[in-house]
Image (cartoon, rainbow, N blue to C red):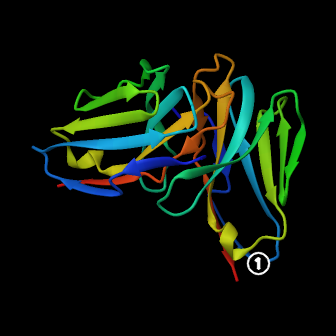
């Protein structure tokens, strides 16, 4: 199974809502990533988890809170977002952290903040 | 931060033609990877070329790497309509801890 799944596919939330994005992989990968992608732009790295520990936080605002409950799951908790946070949020995994190995991406969650 | 710059930003060709995309980067790298993204979907890894390699093939894809010029190219031969997508290069620096994506080339292959 070389698939990374993400739920939900689409999410519309108000600025006062709290919601969570979920990501799952069953490839035995020990690194998982969150990226944010705006239209016609490349993905921008937000967080890296290595062996279930947060190893990189790319200066992401605290209204985004990642969580890695186990080696297969990655969550992104959202609270008090701004309209400019509307984007495609991509989860990825790789054998271990870093760029030596290819990353497998999920289909993304299209987030709209109203 | 964006390390790679891709050229052209957009490319439109007829089915059967070859498509060439270029990527330039700024710092020393461990490897360079190419990914494809269909509209609004996740990225798919295409090929990885290490810094000590100069050329690599995978099916209709050919990637070259010139570390002296800090550049790479992706050639898609005999293009198909299904190749329509955005193509991104991504570099892994020598610290090895993350990938940095280039701006991407939007390829349209007309049937």
- On the image, the x and y values in percent for residue B22 come to 74, 49
Q: Secondary structure at mark 1?
A: loop
Q: Is residue A60 visible?
A: no
* Residue B77, image x, y percentages: 84, 65
Q: Quadrant of residue B50?
A: top right
Task: Provide the residue designation for mark 1.
Answer: B15
- Please report, as a chain letter, where disc 1 is located: B
Relative horizontal placement of residue A68, taking residue A61 as reference (left or right): right
Q: Who is closer to the viewer here, B56 or A85?
A: B56
**Residue A112 seen in this snapshot:** yes
* Residue A71 in the image: above or below residue A110: above
| Side (left or right) of B31 relative to A28 | right
Q: What is the residue that sits farthest to the right in this orientation? A: B54
What residue lies at 41% left-to-right and 34% top-to-bottom? A73
Q: Nearer the viewer, residue A19 or A79?
A: A19
Q: Quadrant of the C terminus of chain A?
A: bottom left
- Residue drawn at point x = 42 percent, y = 17 percent: A53
At horizontal 72% and vertical 25% (from top left) the residue drawn is B29
What x and y, as percent, mark residue A98?
Answer: 60, 24
Residue placed at 50% from the left, 40% from the top?
A25
Number of marks in the image?
1
In the rendered image, the residue lying farthest to the bottom is B111
Q: Nearer the viewer, residue A75 or A26?
A: A26
Badge 1, how many Cα within 10 Å: few under 14, some, many 20+? some
Q: Position of residue A89 (x, y in %)?
A: 39, 46
């Amino acid at each position: 199974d070389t698939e990374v799944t993400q739920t939900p596919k689409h999410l519309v939330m108000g600025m006062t809502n709290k919601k969570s994005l979920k990501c799952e992989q069953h490839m035995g990968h020990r690194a998982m990533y969150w990226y944010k992608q705006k239209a016609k732009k490349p993905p921008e790295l937000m967080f890296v988890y290595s062996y279930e520990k947060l190893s990189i936080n790319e200066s992401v605002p605290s209204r985004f809170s990642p969580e890695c409950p186990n080696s297969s799951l990655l969550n992104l908790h959202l609270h008090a977002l701004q309209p400019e946070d509307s984007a495609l949020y991509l989860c990825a995994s790789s054998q271990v952290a870093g760029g030596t190995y290819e990353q497998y991406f999920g289909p993304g969650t299209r987030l709209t903040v109203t | 931060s964006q390390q790679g710059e891709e050229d052209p930003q957009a490319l439109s060709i007829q089915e059967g033609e070859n498509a060439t995309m270029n990527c330039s980067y700024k710092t020393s790298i461990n490897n360079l990877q190419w990914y494809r993204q269909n509209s609004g979907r996740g990225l798919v890894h295409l090929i990885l070329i290490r810094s000590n390699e100069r050329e690599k093939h995978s099916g209709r894809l050919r990637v070259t790497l010139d570390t002296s010029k800090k550049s790479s190219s992706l050639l898609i031969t005999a293009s198909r309509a299904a190749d329509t997508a955005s193509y991104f290069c991504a570099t892994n620096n020598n610290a090895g801890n993350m990938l940095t994506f280039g701006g991407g080339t939007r390829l349209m292959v007309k049937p």
